Image (cartoon, helix red, strand yellow):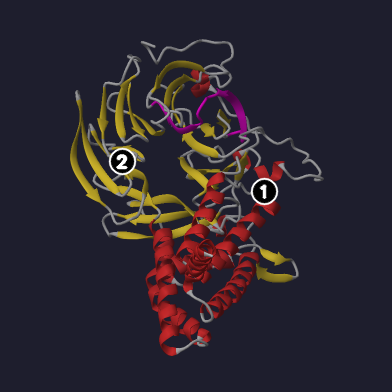
Amino acid sequence: MTNLAEATGDKDDEYKMEDYDKEESKDDREGLRGIACYANNSDDPYMTNVVDSDNESDAGDLEIKENDNLVAALKCEEDESALVCYLYNHDEKDWYVHHHYDLPSPALHVERILFDPGTDNRKGNLVAVGSIEGDITIWDLDILDLAESVVTLGTPKSERNKKGKKKAKKPQSKGHEQAVLSLAWNELMPHVLASGGADSQLLLWDLERAEMSTALGRFKGMAQTLAWHPTEKAILLTGSMDGTVTVVDCATMNGVLTGAWRFGNNSEINKVKWDTFNSTCAYIACEDGYIRYVDTRALTKPIYSVKAYDGHAVESLSLNYMVKDLFVTVGENTLSVWKNEPTGCTLAHSEELDLGTLHTVEFCPDVPSVVIVGGITLLIGALLFSSFLGHYQQRLYVKYGKGGDREAMFYVHFLSLPGFLALWPSISTGLQDTMLTAPMHSLIPVPLAAFKLILIIIFQWICIKNVYKLTSVTDSLNVTLVTTLRKFLSLSLSVIFFDNRFTLLHGLAFMLVTLGTFLYNDSFCIWIRDAWENRNKKKEE
């Protein structure tokens, strides 16, 4: 373990990592190589229905300049999941949704890939997305109107569980059996992608062949964070849910563990990062609120352990690309800036952000003073506003009488329309993407996405109409109970018919919401009081 750079010279060097730079790729190789990508649809010979927009403002919004940055983020809501690409320009202070892709299933991790074997210079602008279904979808950010991913690595759980289907002519690649928790693209070996799953598998994928090449063994605790070494192309750092951090030499077929630290089950590893200014060391963000800094040449204990947050985890960590020893962390709703020192790290700045629970943080690669932070603010805000609206409607009905559900529905939705003007760039981009999707049928020239959007609007209108009707005849707590039951039924149907995952947390959350609704319900309290009084009367008799 004294020399991470030492090659094993094993005959099982499946990736031939030592000779990769000398290899010439084969023209008949399948996978990403067979995909032709065009930045402009008019240059694509297979695009027969090219839309030439005369709207210069929309064209300007879609244009990506040299000083623009794209931020790829996962957006998961109750009924849909999407990969959303935001455009950020530091000089002009621009920040808006540039385009998005609808995902076939909820996702847990996103990873950039600056590699494309189908281009002359082998450079690309791809993003890999790990889903809860166990597959990895790869998206080309240079193509705005993708209806599906350019390549799928592995087989989704829903496809594996289908019975009675004929097998595909081409055999499916092996892959994860459960959710993909982590991804890491190897910049020194650009055709290699590593993934860690809830099935405790650590896999290497060949992006040129678009298939799994090596299973590096089963790691206890599930590898939920990965990081390739910045200078040694075969060295992979992993962090697991059981508090274990390992260093793996991937130059052999099965992988060799060259080092490990075990911090205990309460120290779930949320993020690992190599120190780019001192490549033998690494940063570790832990669930117990500690930041740990380790040296791969000394496996006995960390160089230091610093308590970053009391009572909550260090959710994520990011190193500054340009300023040595400067890094940031997020925990709960707090963003912290740290300075690394030989004996520990010191807190330089800390600030609470009004973004809800923070889950991820990353420095901008071009502007060293800018970080991107991700959380769940909108979901929490939507739940709070929904609860407030229910109580306000109940007060209106008590004061002015019941029966005005249609009027209430109209004014609530009509008066909120001006607020969507601030989101017009995103709405415009979404409408363009919708109209550019494939038609429903050769005889029906209606975009499939537009047809689905119309159906969603109709069903949402029916649902909202009945909720307002229910609000006019009962109290808001009963409405909350009914809508919770409706959501749970919807989730159950998706589990039964679409093989979506149902966890203990889903059931526990439903029971807690239902129990809380009953406890605060007047009818339930009256029933408890009457039952108690009747019991006391019987005792007296």
- The stretch in magenta equals 208-229
Mark 2 highlights which residue?
Answer: 311
Which residue is nearer to you in this view: 68 or 294? 294
- Write the residue at 33% across / 55% down: 355
Indicate the amino acid at tag 1. Asp
- Write the residue at 53% across / 62% down: 535
Where is the N terminus found, in terms of image quarters?
Answer: top left
Q: Quadrant of residue 270?
A: top left
Q: Quadrant of residue 207?
A: top right
Q: CA distance from mark 2 to mark 1?
A: 36 Å
Q: Is 215 colored magenta in this rendering?
A: yes
The kind of secondary structure the magenta stretch mainly shows is strand
Left or right: where 165 falls relative to 96: right
Element marked by disc 2: loop
- Write the residue at 54% across / 38% down: 180
- Write the residue at 68% across / 46% down: 158
Mark 1 highlights which residue?
Answer: 499
Which residue is nearer to you in this view: 259 or 78? 78
Answer whether residue 51 is visible to the viewer in this image. Answer: no
